[in-house]
Image (cartoon, rainbow, N blue to C red):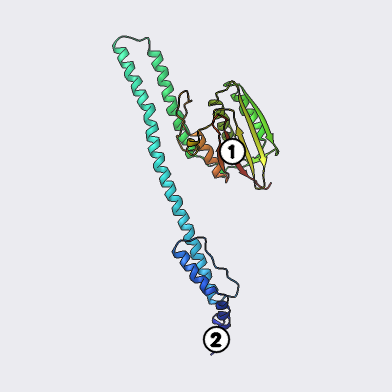
Amino acid sequence: MKKSKLFNSNSLDETLHDNKISQLIKLVEQIASYDFPCKVETDASNSPVDILANGLNMLGEEIENKIQELSEMRETIHNLENFSYTLAHDIKSPINNTIGILELMEMEVEEGNYSRIPEYINLLKSSNQKSLDMANGILEYAQMTSKTRKTEPINVVEMCSQITKELSYVHPISVTYHVDTPHVYYNPNALRQILSNLINNALKFNNKDECKLIVSCISRANDILISVQDNGPGIPEKFKDNIYNLFFRLNGENQPTGTGLGLAIIKKIVLENNGKIWTESPVGEGTVFCFTIPKEKI
């Protein structure tokens, strides 16, 4: 009887000789223990061992993808739980403030004292403005889809100059530029949001007579590094891992108030565009915010 080419004994002997059987056993053990990535090299011989190896390779890849999806889902659920808890906690503050102010107004009116009513009205406006800012920030964060936006060449120096000009009325500011590449490719609204937040934070937390910034845009092998350095008080080491979290705010005497959403939004934009973001901040020596933009072919 003529043997099928699929089960040619010579092919099996060659496969056994190449130790593929032992590789397949190891592959099965790796899949069973979720030890990824794992793969057996195959050739075009179409031998039974290669057919089995291809099937196991596909199975291993599918399991690895499912595990990755499950891990991402767990992280999303964890983030949503933290988000819900923090949101509920932060929303209570302006609501409690509003209730407290209204109770004070009620007491003043009952006593026939109307002199402080304008003051209370201004406090109510301020408290409700914080609630509105927080709501807008949450919507902005939730709707952030910068990865799908169109990119175009942007002159970083021109964009930063426009931003600092708009903010210069708040605090004296000077900027030094270290740039070795004229343009970056990014969505202009997204990049402006990143730079505006970083520059605005530098001004807000600056404790010097003049806010001095150094903006760098440096071309590297696979990406472009952009950094914004200020001459402010710096960020304590213990807070560096928290500053990009939703609603995180530095608490301290004379610290400016905010929604705690700005840096979280920046991080989301950068990561969705396949970049990296980090902070360098020796206390008392200012802060350097760095992020990368992957290079794109024109």
Quote the CA–CA distance across marks 2 and 1: 66 Å
Residue type beneath disc 2 = Lys
Query: Is 111 displayed left or right of 272 in the figure?
Result: left
In the displayed structure, 9 sits above or below 274; it is below
Identify the residue at horizontal 58%, vertical 82% (top origin).
10
Residue at (64%, 28%) from the top-left corner?
162
Q: Which mark is residue 36?
A: none
Q: Give the vertical position of 277 relative to 101 (above or below).
A: below
Residue 30 rendering spot, x and y as whole percentages: 47, 65
Specify the farthest residue to the bottom: 1
The correct choice, above or below, for 21 with respect to 115 in the image is below
Query: In the structure shown, which secondary structural element does the residue marked by tag 2 occupy?
Result: loop
Q: Which residue is mark 1?
A: 290
Q: Is residue 27 above or below residue 280?
A: below
Q: Nearer the viewer, residue 102 or 171?
A: 171
Query: Which badge, 2 or 1, comes first in the chain's sequence?
Result: 2
The kind of residue tagged 1 is Cys
Q: Check disc 1 and report its element: helix, strand or loop.
A: strand
Q: Residue at x 39, y 27 (%)?
A: 94
Residue 269 is situated, as x and y percent measured from the top left of the image, at 54, 40
Horizontal and vertical percent for residue 37? 52, 60
The crowding category of the residue bearing disc 2, from other C-alpha atoms within 10 Å (few below 14, some 14 to 19, many at least 20), is few
Of badges 2 and 1, nearer the viewer stands 1
Q: How many marks?
A: 2
**Residue 161 locus on image (x, y percent):** 65, 28
Q: Nearer the viewer, residue 271 or 114?
A: 271
In the current view of this chain or complex, which residue is farthest to the left?
A: 110
Question: Residue under circle 2?
Answer: 3
The quadrant holding residue 152 is top right
Image check: 21 left or right of 229?
left
Give neighbour class at mark 1: few <14, some 14-19, many 20+ (Cα, 10 Å). Answer: some
